[in-house]
Image (cartoon, helix red, strand yellow):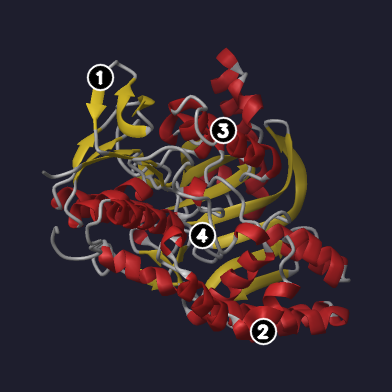
Amino acid sequence: MTRHVLIVGGGVAGLSAGCYALRSGFRTTVVEHNLALGGVCTAWQRGGYTIDGCIHWLTGGPFTELYRELDIVPAVPLRTLETWLTYRDASTGVEIPITRNLDGLVDRLAALAPQDADELRRLRDGAAQLAEMRPPMTASELLGPFDVVQMAWEMRDSIGALVHFRKPLGEWVGTHLHDPGLKRFFTRVLPGTASTYFLLMVLGYLERGYLSRPVGGTNAFRCALERTYRNLGGEVMLHSTVDEIIVEDGHACGVRLADGTLIPADVVISTSSAPETVLRLLGGRYDANRTRERLADWKMFDPIVLASFGVAHAYSEMPSTLLLDNVEPFHVGGVRNDGLYLRIYNDDPSFAPAGHTVVQTMLQTDYDWWATLGSRYNLEKDALTELVINQLEPHFRAFRSAVRVVDLATPLTYWGMARSWRGSYEGWMPRGESFFGGVKKKLRGLEGLYMAGQWVEPGGGVPTAIMSGRQAIELVCADHKRPFRSVGGAG
């Protein structure tokens, strides 16, 4: 008899799990809260413009094999990034492009901060070493002693860098750098609470050509993954909210929907957030204390407002990704912002009509502020639109008069669309101790329930979410004593 795998959530982790389950001989149903699949990995249309809500850059290298297994590439071409981000200090005019020429970047930074030249060269060497390390694609729960020894052996040349850069980015900057401008540069490019390993990975992967953008953006990438899932025969229930994971005799055996519908299953995979899964869907009966401890001790990605503008200018002279630092401070939902992280979609004609583009900025904000607005919600969105236009006007010629479409996604948008816990769109911030291993995908004392997605992979992002879906099915196959198949037909 074909076993039934029910997947809570139709984001990329859920779709990934569904594809691998189908290829491994299971029947699958994806139950999705939203009206469309994709979760946070989504894009939408506004008056002829495409608003991209997810992929600003995509990690390839060892992860590219996952995209091939899921038939995303070569169906969706990946365009290698030559420049990851351009940093510009609005107060001084200093501009630093972070390009694939890592030696050139180090030389430029050393010229600005000669007292930090030695540490910058050490950073450069550490980035190269980290890029050589291949993250394990197999679920950590299935690794044996030999696998662990082999991984340690492969990391032997990188031990010095791993020890030196083990601190959060803010601590590394404070301990090992001297120049104030250089300290600010690194902690604006990435949050100071992030793992310094993450900075090394970005720089090393960029140099190797492992960072890219999918041609057609998030929409093309998401649609390719959905197509693979549906072509394999996967079932989908849209606009269906799971209210409870049903447990009998210590085994997850299905779900109850908000309308009371019961759906039985042999296996349940939850791609909802860890707090949502453990504290709500399971009623706090399994691993609740560990989840609460993580909520208290671990740093989540801060909620954002994603403000997008369809404009009647191409702005072809602008960097496609620009970090404007030291702008006139302004507040978004009670949170002070003095920088603008900008995506100018001038590098792909699929986002806007000819001669037009989309300008998008991510703004730090507070979930509670938005969640308690009540009837003032839309008025505050209108006021924020005016505020952001005023901020952008000095940096984009004739910006106000060129705006044709406005779209604001708040933390409540992320909650309503993808059930992102308190608007945290990527779950846990990557930390030194969790960078090379995520959260266990099974809960103590509960069989038949597996977790996947950004909340079991600190740092989040599309590649690790896809990988976690794959690993969840590896575990399912191991528990059901059947072969795991990453490509080809069913078992």
Question: Could you say which quadrant of the image residue 164 lies in?
Answer: bottom right
Which residue position is annotated with label 1?
261
Look at discs 1 and 4 and give the one toward the viewer: 1
Q: Seen in the image, is 335 located left or right of residue 418?
A: right
Residue found at the far top of this picture: 375
Q: Residue at x 41, y 55 (%)?
A: 468
Q: Nearer the viewer, mark 3 or mark 2?
A: 3
Task: Measuring from the top left, give residue 179's x and y in whole percent.
Answer: 87, 70
Q: Mark on residue 315?
A: 4
Q: Report the residue marked by disc 3.
A: 288
The kind of residue tagged 4 is Tyr
Q: Amino acid at mark 3?
A: Ala
Give the left or right position of residue 246, taking residue 363 as reference. Answer: left
Q: CA distance from mark 1 to mark 4?
A: 51 Å
Q: Residues within 10 Å of mark 3 (few under 14, many from 20)?
A: some
Mark 4 or 2 closer to N-term? 2
In whole angstroms, how far apart are the C-alphas of marks 4 and 3?
50 Å
Q: Which mark is residue 32?
A: none
Look at mark 2 in the image and give the residue it sits on.
125
